[in-house]
Image (tube, rainbow, N blue to C red):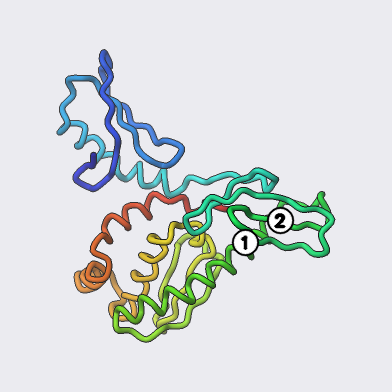
Amino acid sequence: MESDLKVQYELRRKRGQKGVYLKIRSDGSLLVTAGEFVSDAYIADLVRSKSAWYEKAVSTRTVEHDYRTGDVFRMLGHELVLRQVFDAAENRCLVRGGELYLFLKDKSAPSSLRQRLIREEYARKLDEYLKIRIPFWAQRMGLGTPDFRINNAVRQWASCSAAGRLSFSVKSASLNPDLLDYLIVHELSHLRYMNHGPQFKALVASVLPDCKDLKTRLGREYFNSFI
């Protein structure tokens, strides 16, 4: 179900329950439990009134990692299990099949080094993806292919400068491909409209008709989803 502000939620009726309770589950989805006689309209109004709380809560959640064997990471729609190889010739990280391999000279390597190596592999994979998908979407939109860079932004997934250069946080490599494509189209649209007005929204919708759903899903992603 969803409220008028498009906050998706699952509603479960519980016999004997008097109030309405909202719970954010571990995957970021919203669970609402209510008694049998509470109206759907009342529940939708309540969820709507709590939308700011919900959006803030899911946007500030983090996923903890210990950077050890068995840790699970997300990259471009895939879950990768971390494997460590010690006494390696050099410190490096790479994706191999469905696993994220961390090659370390010393098994006592600090977490900061492990984190940096993983970040570098994310940046490499993101660069490969963007080099293919930015030209693809730019051509469909009748635009030239702009320059882009990957940064370590901590407050936004992506941006477009006044000079028309796109930037993507390395963290965006943790997103599903359709959400990353939405980011690309969003930022490319800024090459024509440096605002979020009606024309901008119409352009995004003309390229991605399901852009509202994609935007909602993106808002539920944990920004610190891999570090």
Instruction: Tell me the SS state at disc 1.
Output: helix
Closest to the camera, between mark 1 and mark 2, is 2
Q: Locate residue 40: give its quadrant.
A: top left
Location of mark 2 (residue) = 102
Residue at image point 41% right, 42% down = 28
Tell whether 116 sits left or right of 21.
right
Asked whether the residues under the numbered discs 1 and 2 touch, taking CB atoms below 8 Å apart as contact, a structural biologist would say no
Of residue 204 and residue 208, the one placed in the foreground of this image is 208
Tell whether 119 sits left or right of 108.
left
Badge 2 amino acid? Leu
Residue 208, compared with residue 218, is above or below; it is below
Residue at image point 49% right, 70% down = 129
User: Residue 75 appears at what percent x and percent y?
Assistant: 53, 57
Badge 1 amino acid? Arg
Location of mark 1 (residue) = 119
User: Residue 79 appears at what percent x and percent y?
Assistant: 53, 50
Q: What is the total number of numbered labels drawn onto the structure image? A: 2
Between discs 1 and 2, the one toward the N terminus: 2
Q: Residue furthest bottom?
A: 144
Q: Locate residue 103: give its quadrant.
A: bottom right
Q: Within 10 angstroms of label 2, few (less than 14), some, or many (20 or more) residues? A: many
User: Residue 205 appears at what percent x and percent y?
Assistant: 23, 67
Residue at image point 36% right, 65% down = 182
